[in-house]
Image (cartoon, rainbow, N blue to C red):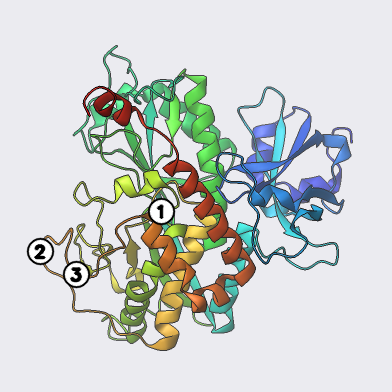
Amino acid sequence: MSDPLHPYWQDALPEAFRLHRGTRKIEEVECIIPDLVGMSRGKAMPFYKFTPDQSFYLPNSLFYETVTGEYVDVEGLADQWTEMDMVLRPDMSTASAAPWANDLTLQVICDLETREGAPIPIAPRNVLKRVLKLYADKGWAPIVAPEIEFYLTRPNLDPNEPIEPPVGRTGRPGAGRQAFSMVAVDEYGAVIDTIYDYTEAQGLQIDTLIQEGGAGQLEINLQHGDPLNLADQVFYFKRAIREAALKHGVFATFMAKPMRDQPGSAMHVHQSVVDIATGRNIFAGEDGKPSEAFFHFIGGSQQHIIELMPLMAPYVNSHRRLTGGMSAPTNLEWGYDNRTTGLRIPNSKPEALRVENRVIGIDANPYLALAATLVAGYRGMVERIEPSPAARGEIFRNGALLPEGPFDMLAAFNEAQEMHDLLGSEFCKLFSAIKLAELNEFQREISPWERKHLLLNV
């Protein structure tokens, strides 16, 4: 396809991409999907080979891999190793530049279907869509606003060596306990400027950016909106941030707890629900006071998030963040403007009344984490579950506590049949098998701590 663009493309491409493109010729298209981890998989092709109505294929076996790349046999899953082709359907509303590429590249997130046009139930984007349909069938639309926390670090080339903070423009390593420091932000100004450039070229909007409490730890807050759109944004943001960091010779990591003595990284999610017909936030009544739906959403969150924690804290490292203290609560209590509770109610006007889930780690797949937290609140509203009384004061390890470790969390997930029915039983069976395989693989690993302290001392 030659330039100038065919009239179809003038309508199909988003404004941000057309502005980024200018007079340059588009060379390549990446058709991508999020895998179970939340990383991008897909196919790249020359621009002239791509049209949105063309069929592209990937084998379903890519969902049967652990984070280490090991394949897992899933008991009871029919025809697992036939490696059935999944059809990629480009969602052109997600079309975006890949501004780090040498040639002008278009990236498009795709939905996954069978050849007959049915959604692939194990695809994370389809799991979230399934939950959003539950809301739509009730005449509701959830609204979310994620916060993305991450670390910039020195390149870590040896996994046996600890991760270290990067060196800033002053030539000194980053220091912790500098939350909200503009001086600390300026230390990494070149990387941040590139993040701004990349995200602007992609049409992504940043609400605010701050220095968090860890050494080299930053937080980007996103504007509120539709959960599928925000999950797509987090998916795109992670890739752009990694690429921006690499351009400046540092790593960006979304590990939940990359450094032992530094705070962990979360993906706090602000949630509210609007009535589709009126556009009104149903968490607030006509008098401006919190509604029954607001309290029931909290009640459902308290009861069901415990069962869904593997979707919000998916790895062994995720649990290193959830140790209490350092603004990482290990409970599902709720309170007004209280950051020691797992469910915080920020100060707001009635129309912006919302529930902030503070237990989700940034290492979670954004589609699955949003599906989990929203389906818990949904069941609370449908079942009219009453919450506990609002907490007061510091309660890091009080009240409704999260399960102690990853095996306990996975056991609770496996017993949550009601949640399996809502999220999709085939997906939940697969996800559980993948997580168990990862945990068992980790159990076989001998850590540097063991070699250091046990080799000659026991």
Image quadrant containing the C terminus: top left
Please, what secondary structure does the residue beneath circle 2 have? loop
Residues under labels 3 and 1: Cα distance?
20 Å
- Label 2–label 3 contact, CB within 8 A: no
Q: Is residue 164 left or right of residue 437?
A: left
Tell me the residue that label 2 is attached to.
393
Q: Quadrant of residue 425?
A: bottom right
314 is higher (above) or lower (below) than 373: above
Tell me the residue that label 3 is attached to.
399
Q: Amino acid at mark 1?
A: Ala
Q: Nearer the viewer, residue 365 or 209?
A: 365
Q: Amino acid at mark 2?
A: Gly
Decide if residue 26 is in sight here.
no
Give the residue displayed 71% in from the left and 33% down from the top. Answer: 105
Image quadrant containing the N terminus: top right
Tell me the residue that label 1 is attached to.
313
60 is higher (above) or lower (below) than 304: above
Q: Residues within 10 Å of mark 1 (few under 14, many from 20)?
A: many
